[in-house]
Image (cartoon, helix red, strand yellow):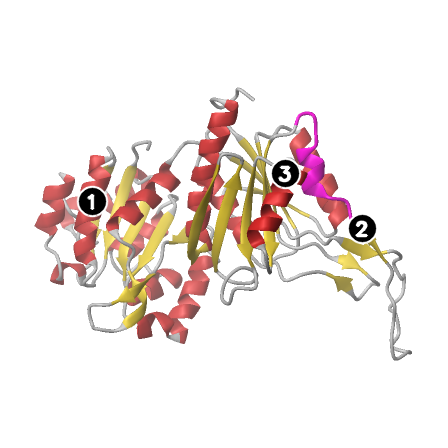
Amino acid sequence: MAARRILLGVTGGIAAYKSAELVRLLKKSGHEVRVVMTRGAEAFVTPLTFQALSGEPVRTSLLDPEAEAGMGHIELAKWADQIVIAPASADFIARLAQGMADDLLTTLCCATEAPIAVAPAMNQAMWSNARTQRNIALLESDPQVSLWGPDQGAQACGDVGPGRMLEAARLHDLVGGTASASLAGRRVVITAGPTREPIDPVRYISNHSSGKMGYALAAAARAAGAEVVLVSGPVAVAAPAGVEVRGIMTAQDMLEEAGRAVDEGCDLFIATAAVADYRPDTFAGDKIKKSNESMNLSLVRNPDTLATIAGRSDAPFTVGFAAETRDVEHYALDKLARKKLNMIVANDVSAPGLGFNSDNNAVTVFWPQGREAIGPGPKAVLAQRLIALIADQLTDKAGPAGAI
């Protein structure tokens, strides 16, 4: 794990005691850690605890005359390679989502260009509240912000449900995923979202893909040091910072644009897009009128972008996705072998609350030498682990960056 400068923000909540262990683990891994505490956090853990563990002074106030004589909050914002808010209370999440800067921690988040990871911690009813979820949706649409958690289980108040902060060891591993320079020097091409196959100027054939998994992987690959090109169908997801997005509409567009991106240089190709298998045989130049009780559409097969890229003589390390509704492992392993992929990520899209149009997912990754189940959890969290796993396999196959 590459050592980095981690700014840990601690907000008010009983889970703040876990943050002390997180500091210890981060320091043990060689990271530099500085801690910023809100007033609420001081009611649960003292600044002296974090000072002793981090070896650095703890900041608690935006209006600290000594620190702010040198514009300390701007210095901290520029210092950080990664900001982690753990625990992140419902109050802090609301203020962050609205772009407020009314204390030191929110001001730092407004002033930094570093990625911000938020580890929610609150009562299950507070987490499920519609206003909290509205704020969460705002953060999920922010390419600078990643949500780590929450977990489910027993809570300090006696309730059981979602809202627990992830354990310190898990947060430590996630910091390692975002901090890794394991894709430094690599060029990554990712496909995401659905395609639309036009029937007439008004109607088209498509699917339920939201693009969220592909966009999360693009953000994770960029955080891991890669140059990333995202070839995307029509989605309502904000482009990740530092990622080049190339918009397409049809399966044929996807094939051509992905091919161009690979021709320009590609070490790793990840195909998360849900490309339509078939398209209408003919396109009606005018809107088809509703004149009969039934209408027949003749469909023809679309080109296979994933198989085409994987079948090239200069094929990059290629990762496919398999969205299935039954016999997930069987179909995934068949696709892995048939399309000559290096890895495949399979998920059951019939599972309630996971997959298409959801912020959460659960997947199993297969490659010739092994497999790993990841999740269920937020797609942003899964993306961090997937990129770390792919990077490990890519290094084993191709050697250091530039060896391909």
| Nearer the observer, 363 or 297 | 363
Label of residue 301 in the image: 2
| Nearer the observer, 133 or 40 | 133
Does 313 lie within the magenta span? yes
Quadrant in which residue 336 is drawn: top right
Residue 245 seen from this side: no
Which one is in front in this view, the residue at disc 2 or the one at disc 3?
A: 3
Q: Are marks 3 and 1 in contact (CB under 8 Å)?
A: no
User: Which percent across, then down, holds residue 161?
Assistant: 32, 69
Give neighbour class at mark 1: few <14, some 14-19, many 20+ (Cα, 10 Å).
many
Task: Give the residue pinned by disc 3.
Answer: 337
Can you say which quadrant of the picture contains the C terminus? top right
Above or below for 378 versus 254: below
Label of residue 131 in the image: none
Label of residue 23 in the image: 1
The amino acid marked with disc number 3 is: Ala
The amino acid marked with disc number 2 is: Arg
User: Which percent across, then down, holds residue 281?
Assistant: 87, 56
Give neighbour class at mark 3: few <14, some 14-19, many 20+ (Cα, 10 Å).
some
User: Which percent across, then down, holds residue 55?
Assistant: 13, 38
Q: Residue at x 67, y 61 (%)?
A: 207
Above or below for 101 versus 179: below
Residue 87 seen from this side: yes
Compare marks 1 and 2 and give the one earlier in the sequence. 1
